[in-house]
Amino acid sequence: MTGPDNLDQRMTDAGIPPRFRSARVADLTGPLEAFARCHLHDKAREGVGVWLFGAYGCGKTHALAAFAAHLLQAGLRVEWADWFWLFRALRSLGDYGATAAQALQVSRTAPILFLDDFGKPGDVQRETALLFEIVNHRYNHRLPTFFSCNAGPDQLFGPGRGNPDPAGAIWDRFGECVEAVGMKETSRRRAAA
């Protein structure tokens, strides 16, 4: 079956949150829609992901879900994880058994991994070390990773930030495996209120 019901089920199976399962590339505007329609499929097949960044509430998660739907419609398999969930689960490896094992499996083997909400206030040093493990494995195996974050990768890992390894190593790999796409929109939540 190739209808919308099948796509909805595949989005559910991929772990995309219910609020964002209706997101589609047609909902996006301007350069974001053009990027998705013209480049997304080819980039993913080449092992290149996207770092989508912008202000709180500008639609990053919605756009990420639309990207996932677009790739699912093309027959590709994706997995979705919230960064906080993944970080907590991986940090507690050995303590939580199945949850941690599942998190590790998803982060290492998903053909296309979507990591939502990276970089919110937290333990940046530990998160950076964990992100390096994920990025390095996925870089070596040409597995694309799609991120949403409030800051651009250059702001977190780039030159001039005084970042020792592993942040510098993440930045180096991102040059080949992630395309940064900034969103200029303001908060949709505030506009709707």
Image: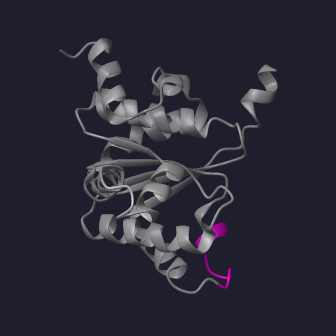
Is 152 magenta? The answer is: no
Q: Which residue is found at the position 46% from the left and 64% from the top?
A: 91
Q: Which residues are magenta?
A: 155-162
| Of residues 163 and 97, the one drawn nearer to the viewer in this rendering | 97
Instruction: Look at the magenta stretch and give its main secondary structure.
Output: loop
Q: Nearer the viewer, residue 92 or 133?
A: 92
Does residue 139 sit above or below 110 in this rendering?
below
- Whether residue 157 is in magenta: the answer is yes
Horizontal side of 84 relative to 54 (left or right) equals: left
**Where is residue 57 shown, x and y percent of the image?**
70, 37
Q: Is residue 30 left or right of residue 185?
A: left
Q: Quadrant of the C terminus?
A: top right
Quadrant of res 183: top right
Nearer to us in this view, 121 or 181? 121
Whether residue 175 is visible to the viewer of this picture, yes or no, is no
Quadrant of the rendering where the N terminus is positioned: top left
Q: Quadrant of residue 6?
A: top left
Q: Outermost residue, front direction?
A: 95
Instruction: Count the labels in the image.
Output: 0
| x 49%, y 49%: residue | 85
Compared with 15, 21 (above or below) is: above
Q: Is residue 14 above or below residue 165?
A: above
Please give the name of the residue rendered at 77% of the width and 37% of the height, measured from the top-left corner. 186
Q: Inspect this view and state whether residue 82 appears.
A: yes
